[in-house]
Image: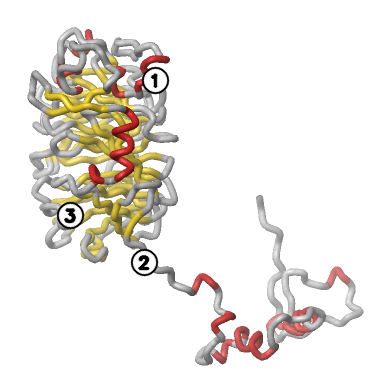
């Protein structure tokens, strides 16, 4: 709605001369009040504080005078720094807040052997952080001219790339901060990732619904797949072997592209009931996790061609109260984390199949999450302009986690196929289904598509198992 027109200042206004009291109303400018008018209006009110104090706070020439403490606004009182985050009853997770961006923090990573942090923001900056004191080590120059939507870093932490809404992908040397190259596209870039071996960069397109794979050394195009999806791509990533690219989209579809054969290996339509927001591989490349606006996450077996016949996946539910925006596996796939529109970070025990803990504290949507290689730290980026570094080293000793385990009634077993320890619900009686961990269960030939062991026991009793087709 347009704002009402304001009167332009005149010489009389600047000299603070009042209009004659007999002047007609049409000649009076309501947008300007002179000091004399304000003084007469204020004189009609009884002040609850001495006039001298009021004038002192209004007089710009008395800045050096000390204002009485009782007149200081509350916002000037610095709160005591929080050391522990009390997310839920019985939960004590140490955390550190990193502030320095002026807009939403859209992407975050651990790098340099977990000793540094990388972030990108809608304030058009890419920053390198020292997690010890929370300071910014480097603000990469030759910054994008539009919001940064995603950053990526090579496995050896030598190079950084960032995709921006200015239709560019930029690369910097991490150590020197020097801009190495910049590639401009004809369409908006919504995602960018380095391959694990550092040889390729994949970018996801918005309007063209496609992906572009580029040689990161020669800055040459390896392949461009337009209309790879029917709607905008939301995320794409390489598998650990740097040979396959998974992409997800608003069209609820998952696609896997082979770099060598330049062909689509796998297509899963209607993988979720709403738009898919993110995807990530396990470090074995055997499984792919997808997060969705339908509030769920799914873990898919993408290793064998038999997938089309089995449609094997498991669903992680009841972890977020809103859309899930991001997901990330721990290096050994023992747990998974996700961030969502409900402002929380969920920690999932994949083998046991339940949400281990919910980290609360952000004031807005959690846009991205990351896990350190040593599995001791979680990093979350939020639209509230901050990042949070959470220490989960002693998560299994937290009373709330112990309480959750007792509530669902879990007992420990050892997988007969891979010897991985895993837990099962005490109420489960199927000897065939629960002699193996969740990953081996997905991988077992003839297993029903969507194992319901990753939902609560009451949910399994009251709900029929999901269908097992690839169109689920």
Q: Looking at the picture, does residue 432 appear above or below residue 390?
A: above
Q: What distance separates the C-alpha of mark 1 from that of mark 3?
A: 49 Å
Do residues under tags 1 and 3 come within 8 Å of each other at their CB atoms? no
Disc number lying in front (1 or 3): 1
Residue pointed to by mark 2: 81
Residue pointed to by mark 3: 172
Residue farthest along the right direction in this orientation: 22
Label 2 environment density (alpha carbons within 10 Å; few <14, some 14–19, many ≥20):
few
Element on which disc 3 rests: strand
Disc number lying in front (2 or 1): 1
Q: Residue at x 11, y 45 (%)?
A: 155
**For this view, does 166 lie left or right of residue 377?**
right
Q: What distance separates the C-alpha of mark 2 from that of mark 1?
A: 42 Å
Q: What distance separates the C-alpha of mark 3 from that of mark 2?
A: 35 Å
Closer to the chain start, of discs 2 and 1, is: 2
Residue pointed to by mark 1: 459
Element on which disc 1 rests: helix
State which quadrant residue 395 falls in: top left
- Front residue (pair 128, 221): 128
């Amino acid at each position: 709605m347009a704002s009402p027109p304001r009167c332009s200042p005149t010489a009389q206004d600047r000299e603070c001369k009042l209009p004659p009291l007999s002047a007609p109303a049409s000649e009076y400018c309501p947008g300007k009040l002179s000091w004399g008018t304000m003084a007469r209006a204020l004189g009609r009110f009884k002040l609850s504080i001495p006039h001298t104090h009021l004038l002192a706070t209004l007089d710009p020439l008395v800045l050096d005078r000390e204002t009485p403490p009782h007149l200081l606004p509350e916002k000037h009182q610095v709160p005591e720094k929080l050391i522990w985050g009390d997310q839920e009853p019985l939960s004590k997770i140490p955390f550190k807040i990193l502030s320095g961006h002026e807009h939403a923090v859209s992407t975050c990573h651990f790098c340099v052997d977990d000793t540094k942090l990388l972030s990108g923001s809608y304030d058009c900056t890419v920053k390198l952080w020292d997690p010890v004191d929370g300071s910014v080590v480097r603000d990469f120059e030759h910054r994008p001219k539009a919001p940064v939507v995603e950053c990526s870093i090579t496995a050896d932490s030598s190079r950084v790339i960032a995709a921006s809404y200015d239709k560019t992908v930029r690369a910097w040397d991490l150590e020197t901060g020097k801009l190495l190259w910049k590639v401009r596209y004809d369409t908006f870039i919504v995602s960018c990732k380095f391959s694990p071996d550092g040889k390729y960069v994949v970018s996801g397109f918005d309007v063209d619904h496609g992906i572009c794979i580029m040689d990161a050394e020669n800055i040459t195009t390896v392949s461009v797949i337009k209309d790879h999806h029917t709607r905008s791509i939301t995320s794409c990533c390489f598998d650990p072997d740097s040979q396959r690219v998974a992409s997800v989209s608003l069209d609820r579809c998952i696609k896997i592209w082979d770099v060598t054969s330049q062909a689509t290996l796998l297509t899963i339509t209607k993988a979720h009931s709403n738009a898919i927001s993110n995807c990530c591989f396990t470090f074995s490349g055997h499984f792919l996790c997808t997060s969705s606006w339908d509030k769920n996450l799914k873990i898919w077996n993408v290793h064998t061609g038999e997938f089309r016949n089995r449609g094997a996946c498991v669903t992680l539910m009841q972890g977020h109260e809103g859309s899930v925006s991001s997901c990330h596996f721990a290096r050994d796939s023992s747990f998974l984390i996700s961030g969502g529109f409900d402002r929380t970070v969920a920690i999932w025990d994949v083998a046991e199949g339940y949400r281990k803990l919910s980290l609360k504290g952000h004031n807005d949507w959690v846009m991205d999450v990351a896990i350190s290689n040593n599995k001791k730290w979680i990093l979350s980026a939020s639209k509230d302009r901050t990042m949070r570094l959470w220490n989960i080293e002693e998560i299994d000793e937290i009373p709330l986690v112990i309480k959750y385990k007792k509530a669902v009634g879990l007992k420990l077993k050892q997988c007969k196929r891979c010897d991985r320890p895993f837990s099962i619900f005490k109420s489960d009686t199927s000897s065939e289904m629960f002699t193996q961990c969740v990953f081996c269960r997905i991988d077992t030939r003839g297993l029903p598509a969507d194992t319901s062991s990753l939902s609560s026991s009451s949910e399994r009793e009251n709900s029929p198992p999901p269908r097992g087709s690839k169109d689920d």
